[in-house]
């Protein structure tokens, strides 16, 4: 077996065992997840991802391992944006908290399947047509600019999405959760509940986010192993991260700008790769990318916390006038 095949095999085994452990020991059907449990599960998935980073370093070497770590951090930070949208979807369809965990799990497993297909197509396109990378680069520049300048007042309505309108047009939908079921029968005909709609929306919304994240990861590495593993590990940790951050995610006011800067940075790197390679070796580029991601994400989170803390007394003062 080649080194890559060994890494893929280990990754697959770890993935299966982790899912069994997560579903069997860390999760209970129709039970609410506390902050403590969410923290434990988040620690579990992050530890697995970092453990795989060490394994990659041993088996594949420094450069692929650091590319994996950079890609994982990029995906992990982008997943925080997913959480905000997930919260809106759950609130919009009035999903009971006891169903959150199960619905998130199914939606995330579907998202992983779609991402594997999307990555496979993307890698095949880049392998066949290298100029596609320039399209990705321009797309990242545009996405980063739009994200940086996005109006906070712009609202997202899950009932106004194309996916929901298609579901409503072609499927008989119920306006309730069917007691925790995804499909019920009325007059002998199948009716799809709000939980079914939420699962489809979660998976499709994640695929929309993948349009940003996968080109960004390809700007960090072209190694299929790095792209697949970093994406899947980040998505698998999304469920526990949702429960951990759902009350605090709205406080990260400047995280979006931090992510936007990273996307623009990677877009510029992709567009100028030919010239950058003449001046900076690949290993150094990996360190620069990793440092940029850490700086922007950590900086935007701490700046958000600082502004919120600083704005507290000011808001109180404004309210007293």
Image: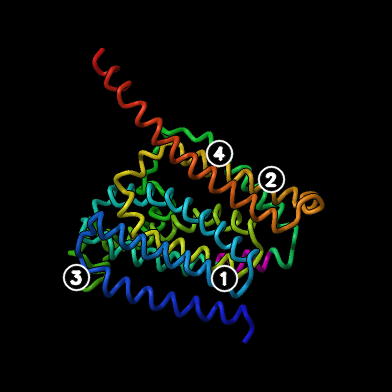
Indicate which disc, 1 or 4, sits on the residue closer to the N terminus. Answer: 1
Marks 1 and 4 sit apart, C-alpha to C-alpha, by 35 Å
Range shown magenta: 118-125
Q: Nearer the viewer, mark 2 or mark 4?
A: 2
Q: Is residue 261 above or below residue 280?
A: above
Residue 308 pos. (x, y %): 36, 31
What is the C-alpha distance between the residues marked 2 and 3? 58 Å
Disc on the earlier residue, 3 or 4: 4
Give the Cα distance between marks 2 and 4. Answer: 15 Å
Side (left or right) of 95 relative to 169: left
- Chain-order first, disc 1 or disc 3: 1
**Crowding at mark 2 (Cα within 10 Å: few <14, some 14-19, many 20+):** some
Q: Quadrant of the N terminus?
A: bottom right
Helix, strand or loop at disc 3? Answer: loop
Asked if 144 appears above or below 225 in the picture, the reply is above
Q: Give the label on residue 146, or none.
A: 4
Query: Which disc is residue 56 wearing?
Result: 1
Q: Earlier in the sequence, mark 2 or mark 4?
A: 4
Query: What SS does tag 4 mark?
Result: helix
Q: Are marks 3 and 4 in contact (CB under 8 Å)?
A: no
């Amino acid at each position: 077996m080649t080194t890559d095949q060994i890494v893929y095999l280990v990754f697959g085994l770890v993935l299966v065992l982790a899912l069994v452990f997560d579903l069997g020991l860390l999760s209970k059907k129709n039970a609410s997840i506390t902050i403590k449990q969410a923290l434990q599960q988040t620690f579990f998935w992050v530890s697995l991802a970092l453990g795989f980073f060490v394994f990659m370093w041993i088996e594949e070497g420094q450069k692929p391992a650091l590319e994996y770590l950079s890609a994982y951090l990029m995906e992990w930070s982008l997943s925080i944006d997913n959480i905000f949208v997930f919260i809106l979807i759950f609130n919009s369809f009035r999903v009971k908290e006891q169903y959150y965990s199960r619905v998130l799990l199914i939606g995330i497993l579907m998202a992983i399947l779609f991402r594997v297909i999307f990555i496979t197509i993307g890698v095949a396109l880049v392998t066949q047509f290298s100029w596609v990378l320039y399209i990705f680069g321009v797309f990242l520049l545009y996405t980063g600019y739009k994200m940086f300048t996005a109006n906070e007042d712009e609202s997202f309505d899950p009932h106004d999405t194309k996916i929901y309108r298609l579901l409503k047009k072609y499927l008989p939908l119920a306006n309730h959760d069917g007691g925790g079921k995804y499909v019920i029968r009325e007059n002998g005909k199948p009716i799809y509940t709000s939980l079914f709609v939420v699962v489809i929306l979660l998976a499709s919304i994640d695929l929309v986010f993948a349009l940003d994240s996968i080109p960004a990861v390809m700007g960090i590495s072209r190694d299929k192993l790095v792209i697949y593993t970093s994406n899947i590990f980040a998505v698998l940790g999304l469920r526990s991260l949702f429960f951990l951050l759902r009350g605090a995610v709205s406080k990260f006011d400047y995280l979006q700008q931090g992510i936007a800067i990273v996307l623009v940075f990677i877009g510029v790197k992709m567009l100028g790769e030919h010239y950058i390679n003449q001046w900076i070796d690949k290993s150094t580029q990996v360190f620069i990318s990793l440092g940029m991601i850490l700086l922007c994400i950590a900086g935007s989170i701490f700046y958000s916390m600082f502004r919120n803390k600083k704005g507290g007394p000011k808001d109180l003062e404004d309210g007293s006038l």
